[in-house]
Image (cartoon, helix red, strand yellow):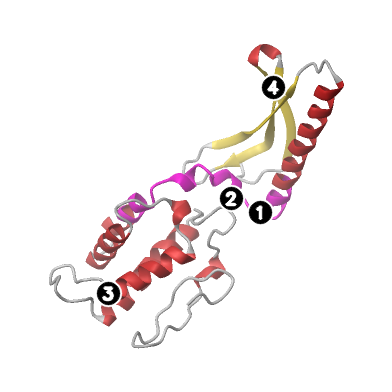
Amino acid sequence: MSNICKTVTLRTRKIKGGEQLSFYLDYYPGYRDESTMKVMRHESLGIYIYAKPKSQREKDYNDRMREKAEALRCRRYESIVNERYDFFDRDKMKGDFLAYFKQKADKKNCKWQHVYKHFARFCNNKCRFDEINVDLCNKFREYLLTAPQTIHTEHKLHINSVAGYWSTFRAVLLTRRLSGGRIGPARRGFRHSAFRWFPVFGGLGCIGFPAYGGHVG
């Protein structure tokens, strides 16, 4: 089955003994997550209406909620038409970015291990995917400029090491994007175009950093 949905239908199901109805979206033929191979066919919207409205107030309430649910259905369908499937990744965005980083670093060389250790120290051993944004990346870049060496802690990192570590960190983010995963806040996640190179001068030579929609250096 293809991982591309073709239709999005708004449906309801009974809850609370049948007194209320819950709106959900029915995706056909479903969306297959290529990383887990699980098929997602339904999405609960968290919007509820009266199953049998008894007053005009309840009827009006149902109409308003139905309009909101239909607006969400249209928004989802528009995203699918434009091949944007970010809304399926909301739970993944709460995932542990550090665990992902370590998994990749363990398969690479010692430089990746050093960069992982520096980033873990920088973020106090806690960082989710949805916390990765341009501001945090630039702060990590600034951290590297003053960070001590792993072994000779009385000395700062050499400028060439800073450039190499920064390049490796960008590679981690790009690997995540190329594998189809998202990083960054829901409305400001990194795109492929965000990984352009920009010059950073002032003793650093020329290294790059990610930007969203423009120069952020």
Q: Does the magenta run of residues contain 19?
A: no
In terms of sequence position, does the residue under pointer 3 or pointer 2 come before the other?
2
Q: Amino acid at mark 4?
A: Arg
CA–CA distance in space, label 1 to label 2: 9 Å
Q: Amino acid at mark 1?
A: Glu
> Tag 3: Cα neighbours inside 10 Å, few (<14), some, or many (≥20)?
some
CA–CA distance in space, label 3 to label 1: 42 Å
> Tag 2: Cα neighbours inside 10 Å, few (<14), some, or many (≥20)?
some
Residue at 67 percent across and 37 percent down: it is 29
In terms of sequence position, does the residue under pointer 3 or pointer 1 come before the other?
1
- Looking at the image, residue 50 sits to the left or right of residue 112; the answer is right
CA–CA distance in space, label 2 to label 4: 25 Å
Query: Looking at the image, which is closer to me, 37 or 154?
Result: 154
> Furthest-right residue in view?
56
The numbered disc on residue 83 is 1
Name the residue that disc number 4 marks. 13
Q: Position of residue 27 (x, y in %)?
A: 67, 37
Local secondary structure at mark 2: helix
Local secondary structure at mark 4: strand
CA–CA distance in space, label 3 to label 2: 36 Å
- Badge nearest the viewer, 3 or 1: 3
Local secondary structure at mark 1: loop
